[in-house]
Image: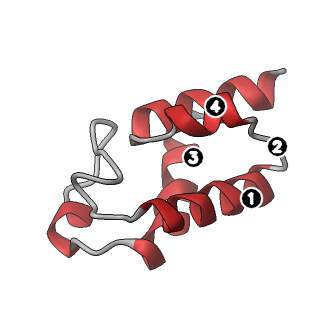
């Protein structure tokens, strides 16, 4: 799966949890979920569970802790799908 496809699916997953509409409109690989989109830590867990379901992967605790930006999350998704 291409990076663009992953970002598109990730955008759909993240949308219900955002608190900053302006940050979401400008979402890019550099977007930080907590600082830019104002997603709280409880909702980050929901996003990770949604990512696992959408991409049919398992995300371990170490990977979970790194999933704070779009770029990091895409990288982890790609690694897990290629494993």
Sequence order check: which comes first, mark 3 or mark 4? 3
**Helix or strand or loop: what does disc 4 sit on?**
helix
Nearest to the eye among marks 1 and 3: give it.
1
Sequence order check: which comes first, mark 4 or mark 1? 1
**Helix or strand or loop: what does disc 3 sit on?**
helix
Residue 76, quarter of the rendered image: top right
Q: CA distance from mark 3 to mark 2?
A: 16 Å
Its colouring scheme is secondary structure
Residue drawn at point x = 71 percent, y = 59 percent: 49
Give the residue number, with chain letter if any, for mark 2: 57
Give the residue number, with chain letter if any, for mark 4: 63
Quarter holding the N terminus? top right
Q: CA distance from mark 4 to mark 1?
A: 17 Å
Sequence order check: which comes first, mark 4 or mark 2? 2
Give the residue number, with chain letter if any, for mark 1: 54
Nearest to the eye among marks 3 and 4: give it.
4
Sequence order check: which comes first, mark 3 or mark 2? 3
Left or right: 38 in relation to 66: left
Residue drawn at point x = 76 percent, y = 50 percent: 55
Asked whether the beta carbons under mark 3 and mark 2 sit within 8 Å of each other, the answer is no
Q: CA distance from mark 3 to mark 4?
A: 20 Å
């Amino acid at each position: 799966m291409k990076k663009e496809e992953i970002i598109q699916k990730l955008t759909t997953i993240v949308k219900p949890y955002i608190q900053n509409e302006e940050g979401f409109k400008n979402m890019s690989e550099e977007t930080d979920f907590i600082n830019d989109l104002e997603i709280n830590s409880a909702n980050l867990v929901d996003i990770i569970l949604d990512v696992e379901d959408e991409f049919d992967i398992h995300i371990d605790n170490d990977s979970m802790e790194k999933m704070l930006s779009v770029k990091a999350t895409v990288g982890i998704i790609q690694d897990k799908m290629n494993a």
